[in-house]
């Protein structure tokens, strides 16, 4: 694989989708990625390397190699056997990850199919929970809302890495929703925003690819919660800022 970061990015994207409760989205990401010829070849190498490792471990057990020498013997044997099998060390490492991604993808696909089958029958509590976690998909991000009155927890995953934004601009945007913004707290790549009014309190943690927003209201209003969340998410994903 010319760009190993693609493998990590696909896995992270799937995990981000799972984090907001979008199992279908996670399954789709991995299915599309695992289905490419390049990844299939890499997965095949991962399977071969896995069998070679098992064979080496079995040989070491049969030879009753002293425990202190096992790591050295294993490394030497594994390196030779991989070379004999035409597998480079980096290819074996990436192949092992790709192999696990394929298994993960298969498990998600099975879950999605079974859940849809059960949902049609109306026989699963899981499907009822997922109906509450409706996924809203927009141009630059998707999000879900979990209601725990008087709190709303809104999770988002961004379709591309966000950029840091000017806090003064954020204050102006939030003022449009009658919210005052405290000075943002920045720790590494994480930004924590707190906003409030006489009847509402908002706390949002913004990461490069995800966001968690918690909002409390004296009079819970899910539509209002979504509006506020979209103002925050739109601000951080806007290309015009």
Image (cartoon, rainbow, N blue to C red):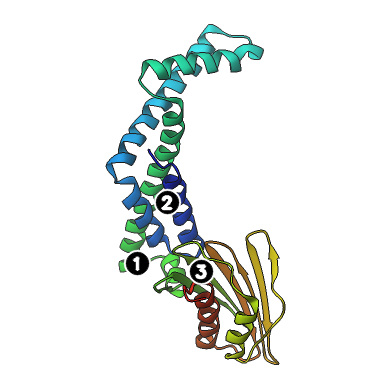
In three-dimensional space, the C-alpha distance between marks 1 and 3, rounded to whole angstroms, equals: 25 Å
Residue 115, x across and y down, in percent: 36, 61
Q: Secondary structure at mark 3?
A: strand
**Residue occupying image coordinates x 55% and y 61%:** 208
Q: CA distance from mark 1 to mark 2?
A: 28 Å
Q: Which residue does the numbered mark 1 point to in the structure image?
A: 119
Judged from the image, the secondary structure of the residue bearing numbered disc 1 is helix
Locate residue 74, reporting x and y percent: 54, 16
How would you rate the neighbour count of disc 1 (Cα within 10 Å): few for under 14, some for 14-19, many for 20 or more? Answer: some
Q: Which mark is residue 156?
A: 3
Residue extending farthest left:
37
Residue 10 tag number: 2
Image point (48%, 53%), residue name: 12
Q: Looking at the image, is 241 positioned above or below residue 6?
A: below
Q: Residues within 10 Å of mark 2 (few under 14, many from 20)?
A: some
* Labels 1 and 3 touching (C-beta < 8 A): no
Image quadrant occupied by the N terminus: top left
Q: In the image, residue 27 lies at what x, y percent?
A: 37, 55
Please name which of the two marks, 1 or 3, marks the residue nearer to the observer: 3
Which residue occupies 63% across, 12% down?
A: 69
């Amino acid at each position: 694989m010319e760009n190993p970061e693609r493998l990590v990015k696909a896995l992270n994207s799937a995990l981000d989708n799972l984090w907001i409760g979008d199992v279908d989205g996670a399954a789709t990401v991995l299915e599309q990625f695992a289905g490419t010829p390049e990844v299939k070849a890499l997965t095949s190498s991962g399977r071969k390397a896995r069998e070679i490792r098992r064979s080496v471990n079995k040989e070491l057990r049969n030879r009753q190699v002293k425990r202190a020498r096992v790591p050295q013997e294993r490394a030497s044997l594994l390196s030779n056997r991989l070379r004999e099998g035409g597998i480079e060390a980096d290819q074996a490492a990436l192949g092992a990850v790709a192999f696990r991604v394929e298994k993960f993808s298969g498990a998600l696909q099975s879950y999605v199919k079974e859940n849809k089958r059960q949902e049609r029958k109306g026989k699963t509590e899981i499907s009822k929970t997922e109906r509450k976690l409706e996924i809203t998909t927009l141009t630059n991000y998707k999000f879900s809302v979990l209601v725990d009155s008087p709190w709303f927890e809104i999770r988002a995953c961004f379709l591309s890495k966000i950029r840091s934004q000017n806090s003064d601009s954020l204050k102006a945007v939030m003022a449009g929703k009658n919210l005052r913004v405290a000075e943002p707290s920045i720790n590494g790549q994480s930004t924590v925003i707190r906003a409030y009014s006489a009847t509402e309190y908002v706390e949002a943690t913004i990461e490069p690819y995800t966001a968690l927003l918690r909002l409390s209201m004296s009079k819970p209003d899910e539509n209002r919660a979504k509006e506020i969340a979209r103002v925050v998410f739109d601000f951080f994903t806007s290309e015009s800022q």
